[in-house]
Amino acid sequence: MANKQNLEENVNLENQSTNVTTAPKVARVAVEPQYGGPEMSYNQGQYQGQGNVAQQNWTAKANTTSIPNDQTAGQNYYNNVAQSVSDNQYFNVQGNQPSLVNSNELNKPKKAGFFRRFTDYLIVRWWLVLLLVIAIALSSLGFYAFQLSQNSTKETFSDVKAFIEAPTTASSGSPVRWKVRVVNQNNVSIQQVEVKLNFDRTFRYTKAINPDPADTSGNLYKLASLSAQAEGTNEAIIQFEGTLSGNIDEEAVMSGEVTYVPTPLAGRENSRIGVPIEAERTRITSPQIGVTMTPTQRDVQNGSEAEIAVVFENLSEKELKDLRVRMTYPDRGGFTYSSSELILDNTTDVKTVPDDGNNVWFISSLPRLRTQTLKVKGIVQGADGVKLNFLVEIDTLGSDGTYQSLRSTTTDVVVTSQPLVLTTEVEGRTASKTYQPGDTLTFVINYQNKSNRPLTSLEILGFVDDEANVLDYKTLAYVGGTNGDLNNNVVQWTARGVPQLETLPPQARGTLKYSIRVKPDAFANLSLPQTAYTLRPRAEARSREIKSIQFSGEEYKALGELSFAQDPITKEISKTKANVEVTWILKSRQTKINDVKVEAITTLPPSSWKNIIVPDDQKNKISYNPVNGKIEWVPGFVEQYSGNGKDPLKVTFTIEVNAQENQSLKSISVFDSPTIVGVDDFTGERYELSGDVVKAQKN
């Protein structure tokens, strides 16, 4: 107990010695059990008080009187002391081997590990940890919502279907209709819908059916919106026509893509969704009809006449019937129709008047391997460089009474506005653009400098398209005091004959004239069709400032001729009775005359008509009406060159004449003056003629 008391007193002394300014104190405790147990030594603890504390050695020994006299009790006592010492912060209890602690180590606080320091830092700043946890949670929630939105867009708004309805087969060059269906099967509406079609090289877009495309090539269509499924209009149909021009049995492929913006995503970035359109194939078959369409001149001066020629041929193995040819002219007043001709190859058939309006012609039959030619003329208007588009469609009448397209094609002419304006015409032939053998035609060329600078060394040429060679250039004469030169049927004017052409000031103008006579026997060539007898004056000009300017005037046609004659022959039966054989004769010149009809009225009794008709092929074309006494002959047409290298058209009929008492045959009229009508097949001119009164006997 003494030792224990000494130890406690030493400890108290230690606690009270804070004012000593010597080196730090090291305590040493030695425990010696009385009963011969092993000596246990505990290393000193280290401590540092306030200020410097003197280093002292402390020794503690067990009191033999206080420890039980057995080894177990001694061991327990030893453990209690050791525990007491170890509980003191100034002691470090160790094992059997005592060791001194460096005095410098006593002054250093023991350094904690990184993890301990980090957790201490976080515990002190718990609010920072809370904010960090909240930020991580919000970020995770936002990322999850974004992924959910993306998945929702793809899964919910992608249900749009698009289909191409293409013909299985299509004749090469024949217009065929394609259809595209777009169906919105989403539960939301879509907007900004665009349909982009991919055409291959064999396809050529011709026209829109509904709606109009967003570009001229016909492969882009824009729709405002489509309603949600089962709400309003959720389907759109696009229809258009096109032609295929690939090899026979080649397959034309058409595909595409539909893009749109779902209404809930409108205004968001990258919200447009695309849906592919599955490709469809059409097999190309051989064409039924071939078509070419070309202008006489590609560049046409503003205000002048353009001519478009369409040639189509039956390429099939059978006759094509009930055809319709339809022209579509440039819109916005770019073209004004003036005339047309529809000509069947190797025949004299010419149709000069459209059957419907100014752009539709009907053809009852087009035999196999035969060609039909349509020429359309009109005045073009437009600014310099404007392209005017012409479209021709050839249709056939179907069993349902509607026309189905066989073939179509297009062509363009370009309006030009030149610094020098040229016009040419035949003087005095504005109302009727015709001529006939023996006429003297005066050709006029007007010119004007429309630029703002002088034109120097101007040269003007005048010539006439004359396929039938009806003009006699030996009769050429200059009119109005101007002189030129004739070279190979081309009249040339320069400053030598027209001084003004040396320098033509801005806005200055002038007129050149020359005349040529039409040959008297101009229409004697039976090998030429009536369409060859046309004259078209042209003019051309060039100077140092301009290379060449051309102008094509209107076409002038040869006027046909319908002539009528009658030859009555009286065969007397008695002095008061006779049979009069009347022969009517119709002739043409170089043109065919249509809608021909001859009428006459007789006052003789119905019994006078003998119904004797010669030749047989005219029996059904002449008639007599006993009620009003009208004799009517309707041959239909008179062939070209009839009576001018070919036999004229004739019919002979017989009328019996009976003289009354005190009446001579010479005084009896068989019928009054007959009337004759017909229409020129080439020019459209109408003929109205009259014949002489026929007497029973000639005077």
Image (cartoon, helix red, strand yellow):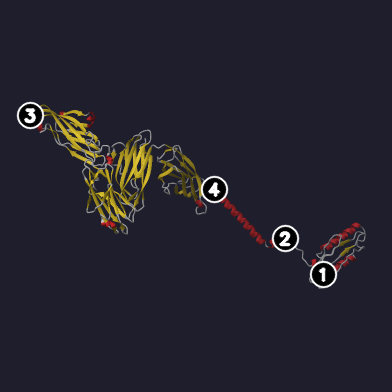
**Above-or-below relation of 42 to 261:** below
Q: Are marks 2 and 4 in contact (CB under 8 Å)?
A: no
Q: Is residue 192 left or right of residue 509?
A: right
- SS state under label 4: helix
Location of residue 398 with respect to 538 vertically, above or below: above
Which residue is found at the position 9% from the left and 29% from the top? Answer: 660
Give the Cα distance between marks 3 and 4: 114 Å
- Label 4 belongs to which residue? 154
The answer to which of 236 and 314 lies nearer the viewer is: 314
| N-term-proximal mark, 3 vs 4 | 4
Cβ atoms under marks 1 and 3 closer than 8 Å: no
The residue sitting at 41% across, 36% down in the picture is: 286
> Residue type at mark 4?
Lys
Q: Amino acid at mark 1?
A: Pro
Quarter of the rendering occupied by the N terminus: bottom right
Label 3 or label 4, whichever lies nearer to me, is 3
Report the Cα–Cα distance between label 2 and label 4: 49 Å
Instruction: Give coordinates of residue 667: x percent, y percent.
Output: 9, 33
Is 88 in front, or is 28?
Answer: 28
Dot label at residue 521: none
The 10 Å Cα crowd at callout 3, few under 14, some 14 to 19, many 20 or more, is few
Left or right for 390, reference 583: right
Q: Nearer the viewer, mark 1 or mark 3?
A: 3
Label 2 neighbour load within 10 Å: few <14, some 14-19, many 20+? few
First in sequence: mark 4 or mark 1? 1
Q: Which residue is mark 3?
A: 661
User: Which element type, helix, strand or loop, lies under badge 3?
Assistant: loop
Q: State the residue position of label 1.
A: 24
Q: Are marks 3 and 4 in contact (CB under 8 Å)?
A: no
- Mark identifier at residue 114: 2
